[in-house]
Amino acid sequence: MKKVTLLLALFAFCSWQTVMAQKTINGVVTDAKDGLTIPGVNVVVKGTTTGTTTGLDGGYSLKVPANAPTLVFSFVGYETQEVAIGTQTLINISLNPTAEQLQEVVVTALGIKRDQRALGYAVSSVSAKEITKVGTSNFGSALYGKATNVRISAAPGGATSAVNINIRGTNSITGSSTPLIIVDGVPIRNGENNNQSYWDDQRIRGNGLIDINPEDIENVSILKGAAASALYGSEAANGVVLITTKTGKSGKKGLTVDVNASYFMEKVAYLPDYQNDYGPGYDRGTNMGSFGSDDQGWLKVNENGTEYYRPIYRSYAQFGPKFDGRDVMGWNGEVVPYTAKENNMADLYQTGFGSMINFAVSQNSDNGSYRFAFTRNDDQGIQRSNKHHRNSFVFNSNFKVGKRVSMDMSANYINQYTKNRAYRMWAIGANYGGFFSRFDDMQWYLDAYKTSLDYKWDRYDVDPTKTLTYDERLKYHIRAYDLLDMLWNMNENSQEEFNNRLLANLTTTVDIFKGLKFRGRIATDYTSDYQESRNPNERPISLGFNSGSFGQAHSLYTIAYGDALLMYNKDITSDFAINANLGVTGRKEWNTWTNRSTRDGLSVRNWWSLNASNNENPYSGSGYRELIRYAYLGTLQFSYKNWAFVEVTGRQEASSTLHPKSNSFFYPSFSGSVILSDALQLPKEINYAKVRASYGIVGNPPEMYKANNAYNLGSFLGTIYNSVPAAYGNDMIKPEEKHEFEVGLETRFFNSRLGFEFSFYNAILNGQILELQVPTSVGASSMLANVGKLKNQGFEFAFWGTPVKKTDFQWDARFNFGFNRNEVLELMPGVDRLEHYDIDAGAAKIVSEPGKPMGDIICFMPMKDPDGNLIIENGEYKVDFSEMKTAGNVQPKAVGGLGNTLSYKGFVLDFLIDFRWGGEIMSLYNRYAEGAGMFKSTLPGRDADNGGVAYYVDGDGNKVASSASAGPNGETIYHDGIILDGVKEIKDENGTVTGYAKNDVIVDAATYYLDAFTWGANPSWGSGMSRYDLSIYDNSYIKFRELSFGYNLPKSLISKIGLSNLQVSLVGRNLFYLYKNLPNMDSEVLLGSNWINQGIDTGTSTASSRSLGITFRASF
Amino acid sequence: MIMKNTISKIILAVSMVALITTSCSKDKLAEIYPDPSKTSSASVERFFTGVLTASLDYVRMEYWRLFVVEQPSLGHYTQVMGWTNGEKQYEIAIGPVSDRWNAYYTGVMLQYREFMRLYNELPENEKPDYDIMRMAASIYFYDHSQQMVDIWGKIPWSEAGMLRTNNGDLVASKPKYDDGEIIYTAMLDDLKNMAESFKTLTISEGYQKIFTTQDVFLNGDIQKWRKYCNSLRLRMLMRVSGVSSFQSRVQTEVAAILNNPGDYPLIETNDDNVLRQSVAGTYESSGLQSAFETWGVYDIAPYTMVEHMKTNGDPRLQCIFEPGANANGEYIGLDPMLNATAQGDQLTAGIVARYNGVTFTRSKMYPGWLCTAAEINFHKAEAYLKILNNDGAAKTAYEAGVKNSILFYYWINQQSLEGSPTLETPSDGVINAYLQSAGVKWDGTANKIKLIGEQEWIHTGISQMGHTWAEIRRLGYPELNFVVDNQSTQSLPPVKWVYPSAEKNLNGDNYAAVSDYDDPNKKVFWDVN
């Protein structure tokens, strides 16, 4: 009996074993209909907790007390069966599928559980197992590819970065596309994130949903259409995600203990394809003219009498001398060989890790149940100095007070510590001031960014009186000063966040009389957040520098929620039933914050106190926001013979974010379904067929206080003054309204071995609210307006099946596909098109125009001759600056996923592939880096090996092609010529174009890349040949998202140590692309919950990571 | 029975809690609709201060104004600072351009329009009490407006800033672009009217008290506003003095102002300077330090200016600049005609002079300049010289300008809170010696406009880069050399800024009328040189 391991000693109370006389019973459980074995069947000695479950082969083995009378076999979807044991030791039985085997209970609006067949709208349901399979730290990223027409976008940066969910395309032009998140019936804080431009917050923020621990989730239901979510009214235009957490009731009777653990390694993934042939330098003309180099881009330096070469370290471009290994004078002052450092970008990152341990105890009895769980997550991202941990406590209980009253109580306390969230990389990704060369060793920068006295680095031209370490200054005028600053900010500055969140919920249900129930609920989501930033002094105080800062910020965010519902169920006749709910719901949200920080630097080096503020008036701020919404609601459903259903719902709502004169709105829905397989005589292969249709209205309100027009009140040196805010509100704004019609079909065939589900929807979105950008010359930066009308139309298809089902081997596959087409129907008078984003001072834009999908990318296009050939002028592209044309659209056309589970005996292989089809992206990261000659894609034409045309420059400065070894007058032959494919204009003496001839004008490769891919596009500036259309890519991809390979240890083995289940899996996430079109970066690293930000890669995102790990799941 | 009781208690309790959270009457919703951090009440006098505190970022030496907007553009065009040559260095960066534009339209323009709306809504009998505020606010608004016209030439003005006045009617509020001539004319007309009104202005003690409280610039000193008003007129009249359509007006009004100092007083001594001063301990400025030091080294002394000052023994040299640490006390400016590598070598060697740390970089008290005595004296000198043909008076004004400039810089230096020792004001002897030096001397110098141009350039320098640039373009002096950037179509500095892209796109119909003019090489209307 001493088989209890050390670990189990902790939980020994749950694994007592009798010392009474025992016998072992073996057997196999099969399906009475098809004779196949059934794994997972509960086998319990009646009246006890002694039991087991059948293995994959349907077999079981159970020790029972010699006098045990009966065994109970139970399994979801089958009728429970009791068998008298008597003297048997071999009990093979077959279970009958229950009549309701096709009935699935789903959670719908307000947490009302409904039979799937009665629903007239689509609901996607994802189970706990799916969510925890590969050990993601939040449920959002676990949804990739699993719910039809639900697009997930997880911001890079690791466990602390936001995850955005987008249901059925983009439903709001405002940018808010995040659905309402409901946990156990209660709305929680989620929020927009990371939509700032690169001038704002440099850290990648999280959102509310990532706090919810996946291990505590029982089920996620996604309400997509307006009818499904109509009971949530003005907040449901983007759909609703309903999360049901695990309770004691979820498990089997008795006491269960689960222990889960995982450990992950994070490695940087999808780094660009750099060229490793050339070092820093511009085109030959600039190198020689502006920097005085030779024609290869070399500068000579004399160091203590010895002559060395060096390239132009100041250059952001990489068209300088070819790497040849010669000794050069490095910018760090050392003589180093001139070679490419092929891993310098990768060396910026580190190997991150993540670990999770979860321990849960639950008990379930007839009078009540509880579940307690504790989860600890530790993470360290791939960016240096980043750290995060989370403790999550959940207590969940249900108990009965007498016969008629039951109470459910749940509390989820989340305690988090986050240090230095991942930093945006705009300093090196979208900024010539941070571009570093392949010649540079990352270690040089890591050594250089701070001095030996732990102050910030000094430039080459620092005033000697303004540094204590003059000898350590940079040797030359280099380019990537912003990388040095970024390293300082990332590694020396510290921002710590201490976050405590409580989600609590108390629900009481009372059976008033048969058929009538009352349910009341109060709940809160409370978050307390404390942030402390410590930025050390960058330069010595003694030399008169004011630097460094210390700041504290507190914020409280509270949601109080309550609802009361009367629920009535009555079978009026044997065929006809009615179900009605009537209730009231209300929510108050408020948020207060205060912050203070030192001003004008710290007076004592690294003294972390507000008293260290050099200025006696530290910065301070505070604020308060409040929001109230309440609604009366009702639902009424009729069912006929349990195969025809009709439902009507209504919600009358009022909200404080709208002007008191027009703050009340009504949101109705109508839906119906017919179970054809019950109503009609269908072929027996069709087990289930349902058609459904629905129509509903939901809304999307303006943000708090956005509509309100009022004055600012300020104080200037003690004088009180009024001013007008630059953003113009609009008291008459109305909420956006979504009217959606939806039809669907759900089927199952061949004993449910195969099934599919299809939906078609059409949504009209009226009164889109936008903070319309206006020309500031009207006297405002923006004005709030209901700007227009949109349409979203699409279909969804989900398919699942079990192609192979053998005794030892089974293959299950799931595939889903959602297609959405968006169109702008009309815009308000005076607005011909909406400009959402201006790229590089008007070089390209993201706009919406009537008759087209939202988010066209427009830019200036190259000029073409009447035959469609590109016109080349002076060897370079000629761009038509007369008008901007559409070059792409940011809306994805379709999203989907393919999941497969293969099981063989105890082994389970599971993998998930997800895809996005269509939708263009403007990639500025690719653009700037190509213009700077950083990527392999800029090698063509640079030298003879890369197809460069040989030429010499004649006395007039013309480039003349030549195959000789020198020009006629001894001119040097260069091999970096490019002759662009296209035609040149033939002009007469008046300059009129008379015809076209094939282009034969040579341009040197560096000039071509620098000009075609430079920042900006404007004929009057130097960027007149700049082609933004070359930086627009279709962003389709197919990604091998998740893989898990698990092994369930044999019951016979683990039962000896008291375990009922033990699974070990190797798992991987974000593994590799099967297909992607966007070069040099992860297709998904875009930042921001706003749909516009999903269409432009501004180069500010950080690299993404690939995770590999191992998970353990054990049950006692 | 007991059970029934329990049930009803629970129902009651839960209902009550649910109702408390949801029993929000319509009144409660209305109560929390307005933003608690804003107010719905406003008064004319408080809005007057709102106008004076708007667009202050372009009055004071703020980080963004200097580092992002003005130094990399105007600072290079005017050579009031040294910089390392780079690729495409004369191309206009559209982001900073937009920032300057937006700071005006959503700053002083927006506040001024709302102020005027409130003023116009006053009962007729109350308006005279607020006249001084209307006039002061207008003067401040015109000063900013002139700076805008000097940069862009044509801007939306007469119809601009009206969205609020038009109750949010966007279509009606999109303004046309006004020609610079029209704007100058309107401002000169109004300033003239105000100059006349000042003659007879009376204000009751009560309203004087309110004005004094709310006037955060000149503390309610009506005489100073009057001088500012006339000085602004003189500045604008001189700006358009070369434009033929303004000839008669310039003649008449300049003569009237200069010949009747009692009626049209000007800012002639440093006591009357219009400055946004810092206040020790509460309203200090670290903008210069941030701009010069935070992101590297941007306080490099320019070559041509340092040479001029050295050659002529300018007393301001040691006050404005300081020698490089390794230069053995010699002042060496960074020559823009050297290539970047050679410039880098000089900087690496630590021999290049910098802006003075006490006066500029580390001073917490460096004031924002709006109108100074030296500048107005230089305008007077030019006016006497060109318009009134009075060389003696021109000389007096010129020398007063130089002297005021010297004294003003030393005063700024002495205000500094930087710990290093401050400089002693030079004696009259030193100043007079400077006035007699070859490059400064009035008598005997043929090209007196050159003298005035160079002195204005040194005086407004980095502190009013907009004016510095305007006067260089208008007068053609000082003569500055630039390397030609053959890698860019903008091979030399522009003479005007281009319009922000948002303005082009969102007010396209009105932009179309000026799109031909939207060229950095097309001149502002007064730039007839």
Image (cartoon, rainbow, N blue to C red):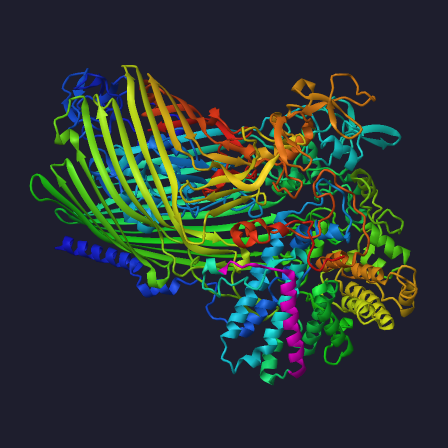
In this view of the protein, can residue A283 be seen by the observer?
yes
Query: Residue B215, position in %: x, y?
Result: 62, 73
Placement of the N terminus of chain B among the 4 image quadrants: bottom left
A312 or A544, nearer to the observer: A312
Q: Residue at x 24, y 31 (%)?
A: A746
In this view of the protein, can residue A932 be seen by the observer?
no
Placement of the C terminus of chain B among the 4 image quadrants: bottom right
Q: Main secondary structure of the magenta part?
A: helix
A382 or A82, nearer to the observer: A382
Query: Residue A376, position in %: x, y?
Result: 44, 37
The image quarter containing residue B458 is bottom right
B224 or A523, nearer to the observer: B224
> From the viewer's perspective, is residue B451 above or below residue B138?
above
> From the viewer's perspective, is residue A99 above or below residue A166?
above
Residue A1025 colored magenta? Answer: no
In this view, the residue farthest toward the left is A573
- From the viewer's perspective, tell me whether residue A150 is left or right of residue A994: left
Residue B183 colored magenta? Answer: yes
Query: Disc count in the image?
Result: 0
Query: Residue A884, position in %: x, y?
Result: 53, 41
Query: Residue A692, position in %: x, y?
Result: 22, 36
The image quarter containing residue A240 is top left
The image quarter containing residue B449 is bottom right
The residues colored magenta run B173-200
- From the viewer's perspective, tell me whether residue B380 is left or right of residue A904: right
- From the viewer's perspective, tell me whether residue B389 is left or right of residue A93: right
> From the viewer's perspective, is residue A1109 above or below residue A821?
above
